[in-house]
Image (cartoon, rainbow, N blue to C red):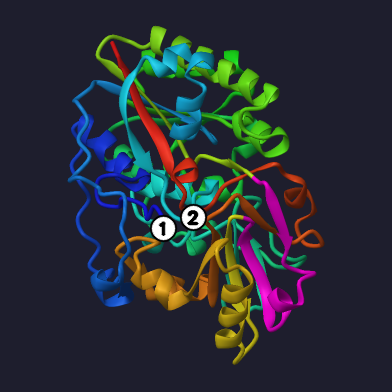
Amino acid sequence: MLVPGYGGGSLADLPDALLAALGVGAPDPDPASPPGAAHASDPASPPSAAGGGPLVLEPADRVCLFLVDGLGAELLRAHAGAAPFLSGLAGRTLTAGFPATTVTSLCSLGTGLTPGEHGMLGLTLAVPGTGHLFNCLRWTLPDGLTMDPELWQPAPTVYQRATRAGLDAVYVGPAEFEGTGLTKAVYRGVRYVAADTVDERVARVHESMRQGAAHVTVYYGDLDAAGHMTGWGSEEWLRQLAIVDDMAQRLAAGLPAGSALYVTADHGMVNATEKIDAESVPELAEGVALLGGEARARHVYAEPGAGPDVLEAWRETLRGKAWVVSRREAVESGWFGPRVRDAWLGRIGDVVAVPCTDLAIIAPSRHRIEALFIGYHGSMTAAEQHVPLLQART
């Protein structure tokens, strides 16, 4: 188990380091946090990827963060020849955070907070008191129900901090994501620049930086999509990796003098060699009210009073294949960070099941497309947790 290295070695530590490189100081501590938080218990905490002290980056006039969905450090290392530019850059490895999934990592990058503080604790989460699951990526609830992004994720973003400091913060990404609930939750305060093709994104980054933007983030998601559908290391995945490598090289080549390009990812990936249908195995279905999370990081919400029995059944059924813990054990072991706000505790499953082998815990009737995937992410294996932080400077 690779518990994320919060406190210097995780994605949550990168936003403050980027702002510090631009001369923006750290935010004031939130006085509401300590009394409203459940703290991890150090004696119960398993080994983690040590943070190694604060993450410090060299000063720069401008920074560009190239965020590649699914570019795990272990995956890149295994196919270094397909990405010669990226493989030749200096850098280090960070941990994604738990769960190692897009919504959680994007919010960590957008707020500089750990998952336990920002509350985006998984792909699909229970909305306490409603009996419904909320998809944080698609920003969907059952018909007739809505979710206010500022209520679900109320923390200030790093882009708001940058703007208050007088910096122009820009996000370059697909037009379809502009104005979505997830974008409003994690990118508040940013100037969104829509760009769909690789050429358009490279051009918009260079234009924005030449026009004075100091903090630019550019996103590419097709590598992750290829990994899900054909597996990481597949022919299509390698084709996408070559596109990413070329895009990074072009981004670096057009940066104004005094700029820094940083390349990172939201998570890595594993190819599933075994799948268990949690809906059709009686031992896994009994007493379960809602099955949230995703295939490599399941939030299991028990029916009233059934929590202990569900925990025992999932532990026994998945013994040797998954780490299965109670909500309290996950919090006290620091999976979501040093503390979890009390307000977010109900979003965590009564049971949290995290595969330690190449297992996917699927639910075909509720998540049909996910059940067909080859590549998955979410767990605390090195292949999913380790993400690169590479840099090129002008």
Q: Mark 1 points at which residue?
A: 115
Q: Does the magenta stretch include residue 38?
A: no
- Quadrant containing the C terminus in the rendered view: top left
Q: Mark 2 points at which residue?
A: 99
Horizontal arrangement in the rendering, residue 289 relative to residue 330 (left or right): right
In the rendered structure, which segment of residues is drawn in magenta? 272-295
Callout 1 amino acid: Pro
Could you say whether the residue bearing mark 1 is in a helix, strand or loop? Answer: helix
- Quadrant containing the N terminus in the rendered view: bottom left
- Pointers 2 and 1 in contact (C-beta within 8 Å): yes
Mark 2 or mark 1, earlier in chain = 2
Could you say whether the residue bearing mark 2 is in a helix, strand or loop? Answer: loop
Disc 2 crowd rating (10 Å Cα; few below 14, some 14-19, many 20+) is many
Callout 2 amino acid: Pro
199, above or below 295, in the image: above
Horizontal arrangement in the rendering, residue 325 relative to residue 94 (left or right): right
Near-viewer residue (246 or 168): 246
